[in-house]
Every structure is written in structure tokens, then in C-alpha cells.
Image (cartoon, coloured by chain):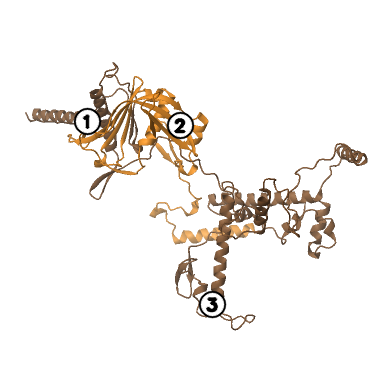
Amino acid sequence: MFGSHNKKRPNNLVIGRMYDYHVLDMIELGIEKFVSLKDIKNSKCPEGTKPMLIFAGNDFDVTEDYRRLKSLLIDFFRGPTVSNIRLAGLEYVLHFTALNGKIYFRSYKLLLKKSGCRTPRIELEEMGPSLDLVLRRTHLASDDLYKLSMKMPKALKPKKKKNISQDTFGTTYGRIHMQKQDLSKLQTRKMKGLKKRPMEKIAEDQERKSKRMKKN
Amino acid sequence: MEGQSVEELLAKAERDEADKLQRITVHKELELEFDLGNLLASDRNPPSGLRHGEPNPEAELRALARDNTQLLINQLWQLPTERVEEALVARLPEPTTRLPREKPVPRPRPLTRWQQFARLKGIRPKKKTNLVWDEVSGQWRRRWGYQRARDDTKEWLIEVPGSADPLEDQFAKRIQAKKERVAKNELNRLRNLARAHKMRLPSSAGMHPTGHQSKQELGRALQVAKVSTASVGRFQERLPKEKAPRGSGKKRKFQPLFGDFAAEKKSQLEMLRVMNSKKPQLDVTRATNKQMREEDQEEAAKRRKTSQKGKRKGGRQGPGGRRKGGPPNQGGKRKGGFGGKMNSGPPGMGGKRKGGQHQGGRRRK
């Protein structure tokens, strides 16, 4: 981030990011109105809290410039990636609104109030710096360079779960692969009445022996 | 009577619920998009109340922010939670927004010397058990590492072999041998690493920081140093017995445009003869070498495939027949030595050589 002030470009702020030791994107924003932390007199939240980011306005998806700006701001403000977060520690909200060619950046402190159910009701208190920004010049990376920078190595790609499929109704099907079964050794229900009695067994054996003799 | 009161109670309960939920519900035309891994919410609705270009839209912005934050918090509170040291902690999913990386994706590393060799020969790592039964201690011990099963260095008795000096310290000898092996392994590891990073490292004069360099590397460093003068090494003297370096001189040699007419005529006619002849001219040595290399690779690939398929089916078919017959590769890879060394070769290899000479391809069964 780089700030400057000259006669031609008053109150300039440049945000950029790098890829492979070269500049990927740079966006120049002009500050129209600025209210600092010190001007707003109330308690602040501790430094280093992971902020919540909210982007309002359909401009952020329509123009390519605004889309890159959104991605840049997310990258800039999001903080470290964590897997768990303490719900009571969510205190800080950054709200970006794109309106009439201006971008309003406001930061609020979160107050959780009791509501009847588990989810609390939110009250906001304006806390931090607020800026009214205007988009000036942009230096965006070409499409293929951007695509290259977004490439993820194979290890980070989410692994597909094999042998699970869903049909159109939403029923999940799984596939199990079994080894070959020896059907003669299948365990079925035992019907006592069909049990071979010793006399019958001997008779069968004799039959088999005689068959073998005939063949030989 | 009771029925009525029950209905009333139910209605009242419903109204209470609705009231409670009212405090946290927000009505929006378009649903927001959430990326909870980044604690991000995107609102696509055009902000309606602020269109007029008011000088101070703070209150509206605040209301909009409050609504959006309420929705985001609703989503966050629905995540699975756990209690960690008397604090309620929610488990966040992976962030879904794709952001560009800072550095490019790492390139695949080149194979190490062993990996290349193993790939060529089709050698695959044998699956070994983690623990080995140790007779001496009477328990299962590691195959290598701390408290391993057969530890050479922990022996209390070493027999002096007949050929060794009786005053030599066998224990010290063993420890020294181990140190040397470790150092050699480390050197090879570093060399593999250097090979992997060869492209990245700046090709400086080529001097190694530790001073251990091979003869070729030193030679190359010397060359580079010689040429890095203002006159590109033209006036650098060579040492009395130093030979000209390999690979210097013109990269391509062209025949003069007109010179030896007889030689030119001969070469052109030879070329025409080759082109016209019905039989293809075969360079026997090159053909056999190529064939051998191909066969090696094919067999290695086939063995890899069968083992993979076998593993999947739950049983290995066993490697397809191992070739018998000594070190045949060494015999074949000596280029251009076939015809000349026919008579002076070892008797055992005579048969193979003969086969190689007549039929270029078939050299073993």
C-alpha cells in the first residue's frame, strides 16, 4: 500500500499485490473523505482481530475493475486463515459499499445483544477509520497471467471422494468392492429338518465312489 | 374449555417465537453469498436507499451494514461448535474465494541419480516391516535408528580378522567407517539437491563454498575465470602442461565453399548411392544400443504396470521374468567398439558379440 499527495493527484492511495516478484495488480484510489480512528471517540477492538468483510452493491460483480478491486481488498484485509474461531471474539466488521462510482469503507465494532434464541442480535458502533474512495487508475494483470497466478498445486486441490454418487432425487449411493466369495462355503440359515442324517451321508459317499469307479 | 386454552397457548407460543426470530431476521431480495472461511459476505442487492447522492449517507450505510452483519452472524452461529477451555469455538470451513498466489507453483523436481537408475531397471522399493525381532535383547526393535535391532556400534566384542594388524583398534575403525558413510550420504544428498536447483542458482564462477569440488567442476570454474577478462581470454597464457579445454572452439564446422573438388564429388556421389540403394544402411552399433535401451525401458514400464494392477486386485502376480545373463548393458553401451574389439573380448561374451554383429536387434532371449 502506498500513499501520496501531489497537485495532480491529491490524496492518493495505491494498493497492489505481487506474483513471482513482479507486480500483478495495482489500483489507485482517491480519498475524498477521511475520518481517522482518533476522531471517533469510543473503545476500539484489539489489534490483530480477524475482521468480517462485507461487500455491498452489485457494482462489485459487474465491472472487471471492481471485481479485481474486491479480490484485492479481500486479500489485503482478511488476516490469517484459521480453522476455528471463538464466537465471542468476532468484534470487527469492515463494510464496503459501491455506490454511484464511490466506494464507502466503514469499520464498525460489533455489539452482541440478547435475542430470544441462540443467535444474538447485532448492534453496530462506528469505530474505526472511514474512507470515501474513488477509483482512479488501474494497472491490472492480463487474463492469462491472472489465471497462472490462480493455479493451485495438486496437493491443495480438494480430494474427490471415490465410489460415492448421487442420483437426481438426492439419494446418495455408495459402491463397495468385495473379494470373490466361495459360494460353497456360504453360511445360510440352518434348517434342522434338512440336516443330513448319518445313514444318508454314508449312502451318498458310496454313490460317489461308485461313480468314480465307473469313470475310471 | 381446555381445548380452547391449549389452542390459545399454542398461538401465544407461536407469536413469541415469531417475535424472537424477528429480532434476528432480515429481509433481503437477493440472498447474500457467504464465504465463511474468510468471514466474508457479498451483498448483490443494489443499495436502494442511497441513490440520491446525499451528502451524508452515514445512517443508511450503518443500517445496511447492520443488516448484512446480522445475516453473516446468523450463518456463523449455525456452524458446528465445540467448547475449548470455557470458550465457545466454531469450526470454520475452508475459504472458497480463490485468490492469486504470491509465488508460482513449484516445478516438479528432477529425479535423483538413484531414481533414474531404478526407473530404468524397473526396481521398485520393497515393502519392509517396521520392527524386527532382536534375538539378543529378546524384543521387537526398530529396523534402523535409536535402539535398533542389530547395532554394529554397540558390540562389546569384535574379533580381529586374520588379515588385519593386531595393534589396530577395531572399534575406532568401525566408528570411522560409519562416519565416512554418513559423510558420503550427506554429500550425495547435497549433490542431488544442487542438481534440483541447478536452474535457479546464479551460475557464478562455480566455486563451491565448502571447497569440495569434483575435477570437472574445478575445470569448468577455471575456464570461466579465464574467459572473464576484457579480451575474452585471448591473451591468457596456459600452464606448461595444461591441455586445451574440452568443448572450446567452433561449435559447427563448415567445409570451405570451394576447395577440394575431388572430395566434394566423392561425398555427393556417395550420398546419391545411399539414397538410391534399396537396402537401408544400418549403423549396427547405434541400432543395437538403441534397441537395448528401448527393451530395458519397456520391461521396466511393463513391470510397473503389472504390479500396479496386481496391487489393485489384491495380489501381486509377480514380476515378469527377470532377465538372466550378467551385465549385458555394459557390453552393449560401448559405442563403436563392436567391430574392433571382436577378437580381444572376453570369451564368455563372445557369443553375444557375434549375435550383435549379425542381427542388430536380437541380442538375448
Q: Name the residue under label 1.
A: B24
Chain A tint in image: orange
Q: Identify residue type, mark 1.
A: Ile
Q: Where is residue B291 in the image (x, y as percent from the top left)?
A: 74, 49
Residue B305 versus residue A58: which sits nearer the camera?
A58
Check contact, mark 1 vs mark 2: CB within 8 A. Answer: no
How many marks do you count on the picture?
3
Which residue is most to the top?
B52
**Marks 1 and 3 on same chain:** yes
Q: The brown chain is which one?
A: B
Q: Which chain carries label 2?
A: A
- In this view of the protein, can residue B55 be seen by the observer? yes
Choose mark 3 or mark 2, whichever is in front. Answer: 2
Task: Identify the image quadrant of the N terminus of chain A.
Answer: top left
Q: Which of marks 1 and 3 is nearer the N terminus?
A: 1
B83 sits left or right of B107 in the view? left
Which residue is most to the left?
B1
Q: Mark 3 points at which residue?
A: B171
Q: Identify residue type, mark 3.
A: Phe
Q: Name the residue under label 2.
A: A25
**Marks 3 and 2 on same chain:** no
Q: Which chain carries label 1?
A: B
Residue B298 versus residue B180: which sits nearer the camera?
B180
Based on the displayed image, in which of its 4 quarters is residue A63 positioned?
top left
Q: Residue A54 carries which label?
A: none
**Label 2 element class:** strand
